[in-house]
Image: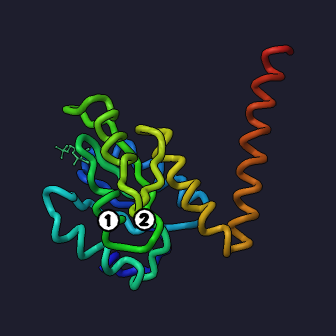
Amino acid sequence: MVSEKKTTVAVVMGSDSDMEVMRSCIETLRDFGIEPAVRIISAHRTPQIAVQFAETAAKDGVKVIIAAAGMAAHLAGALAARTTLPVIGVPLAAKAGLEGVDALLSTIQMPPGVPVATMAIGAAGAKNAAIFAVQILALSDDALAEKLAEFKKTQAEKVIEKDSALTD
Ligand code: RP5
């Protein structure tokens, strides 16, 4: 089961130690009006729960899974192996790891047939995972597509403002 409340996006992370970075993913989804189901599930420490989650997510109304983990980060791949939903992977730089390169390679190097859409390491990837999930959902949701267009416009305006500030 994903959660009591139906939601279209699940944000799964391997440990509570991942939450500090993944908070921006959750907050970005909320900025777009999406309240995600948030879970801590480990491909290595709770493998049966990972399988059960992946196998029931679609039935529970989830349309996109975001999976974040550090070190030998098999979470996104393990979930992708058990669902036809799109899985977005966020490699994280765990304290004991190799600055996220370990997680990046573990997440991105999926064998043909089991894709994981892999984001950048850490904070940038956490935020981009949310935006990418919104982009997928916006294909069949006009209101969300409008919010995305507005987001891009505001983002561009902020850069233009910073550029102007340099020359003022
Ligand atoms: C991974 O191991 C987690 O995703 C986390 O990034 C890393 C370290 O986990 P903890 O030892 O902090 O729980 O599975």
At label 2, which amino acid type do we have? Ile
Q: Nearer the viewer, mark 2 or mark 1?
A: 1
Ligand 1's image quarter is top left
Query: Residue sitting at 32 percent across and 58 percent down?
Result: 77
Label 1 environment density (alpha carbons within 10 Å; few <14, some 14–19, many ≥20): many
Residue 110 drawn at (x, y percent): 36, 53
- Dividing the picture into quarters, in which one does residue 121 lie? top left
- The vertical placement of 82 against 122, above or below, is below
For the view shown, which residue lies furthest in the left direction?
45
Q: Residue furthest right?
A: 168
Counting residues from the N terminus, which is met first, the one under dot 2 or under dot 1? 2
- In the picture of the structure, the residue carrying the numbered disc 2 is 65
Label 2 neighbour load within 10 Å: few <14, some 14-19, many 20+? many
Q: Residue at x 33, y 34 (%)?
A: 100
Query: In the orientation shown, which residue stands out farthest toward the bottom?
Result: 59
- Asked which secondary structure carries label 1, the reply is helix
Which quadrant of the rendered structure holds the C terminus? Answer: top right
Q: What amino acid does circle 1 point to?
A: Leu
- The answer as to whether callout 1 falls within 8 Å of ligand 1 is no
Farthest-out residue, top: 167
Q: Residue at x 40, y 58 (%)?
A: 112
Compared to 61, does 28 lie above or below? Answer: above
Locate residue 120 relative to residue 31 in the image: left or right.
left
**Left or right: 89 with respect to 28?**
left
Which dot marks residue 10? Answer: none
Report if the beta carbon of the residue with label 2 is closer than 8 angstroms to ligand 1: no
Rendered view: 61 above or below 158 = below
